[in-house]
Image (cartoon, rainbow, N blue to C red):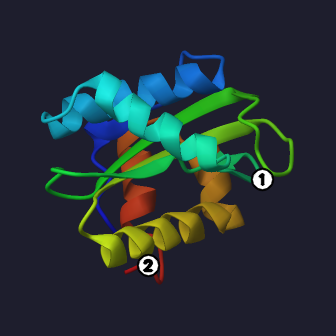
Amino acid sequence: MLPLKKESIILELKATTKEGILRELASMAAVECGRFTEEVLYHVLLEREAVGSTGVGNGVAIPHGKIEGLSDILLCFGRSRAGLNFDAIDNRPVHLFVLLLSPAEKATEYLQALAGVSKILKNPTIHQQLLDSTTKEGIAALFAAAPGVA
């Protein structure tokens, strides 16, 4: 699996709206990639959300997008213990957010990363551990140890 760095993890998101969550994740991603501003990344995420919500159900959202000029796939994780409305397909509150940004020219790797993240979050045991973990290191380790993810 793609590495999830502890610097790319927010244990408790502060935002209480869908747009706020996207902005908070975009802000962290901007710091991590160092090449794009929060505003640029936020608009990439908003454009993708306009196509359809990335709230995939069961308390999970995977905001994602492709961006020209990004050198590598970037993963960020955020959690909202309270949960919030993210227009998920099952209309339930979302607690776990994994941001995935990919270079536009890496379509195959992008789809593989998206499938891998989805597989991790669909695993009921890992899902619960992500909700319960008290450290960034613990969350990063769950992603690193996820079985069967290339």
**Mark 1: secondary structure:** loop
What residue is disc 2 on? 149
User: Does the CB distance between marks 1 and 2 fall below 8 Å?
Assistant: no
Q: Residues within 10 Å of mark 1 (few under 14, many from 20)?
A: some
| Nearest to the observer: residue 95 or residue 133 | 95
Residue found 62% across the figure and 49% down from its top = 51
What residue is disc 1 on? 58
Q: Quadrant of the C terminus?
A: bottom left
Residue 128, horizontal then vertical, whole percent: 67, 52
| Residue 69 showing in the rendered view | yes
Residue found 65% across the figure and 20% down from its top = 17
**Mark 2: secondary structure:** loop
Which residue appears farthest toward the right when viewing the image?
Answer: 91
1 or 2: tag closer to the N-terminus: 1
Q: Residues within 10 Å of mark 2 (few under 14, many from 20)?
A: some
Residue 12, horizontal then vertical, whole percent: 53, 25
Q: Quadrant of the N terminus?
A: bottom left
Query: Is residue 114 toward the left or the right of residue 33 in the image?
Result: right
Residue found 52% across the figure and 46% down from its top = 48
| Residue 132 showing in the rendered view | no
Residue 117, horizontal then vertical, whole percent: 50, 64
| Nearest to the observer: residue 130 or residue 134 | 130
Tell me the kind of residue under disc 1: Asn
Q: Quadrant of residue 93?
A: top right
Tell me the kind of residue under disc 2: Val
Residue found 23% across the figure and 26% down from its top = 37
Please determine whether, in this image, residue 29 is positioned above or below residue 111: above
Q: Which mark is residue 106?
A: none
Please determine whether, in this image, residue 143 is positioned above or below residue 86: below
Query: Is residue 137 toward the left or the right of residue 7 in the image?
Result: right
Please determine whether, in this image, residue 119 is positioned above or below residue 59: below
Q: CA distance from mark 1 to mark 2?
A: 20 Å
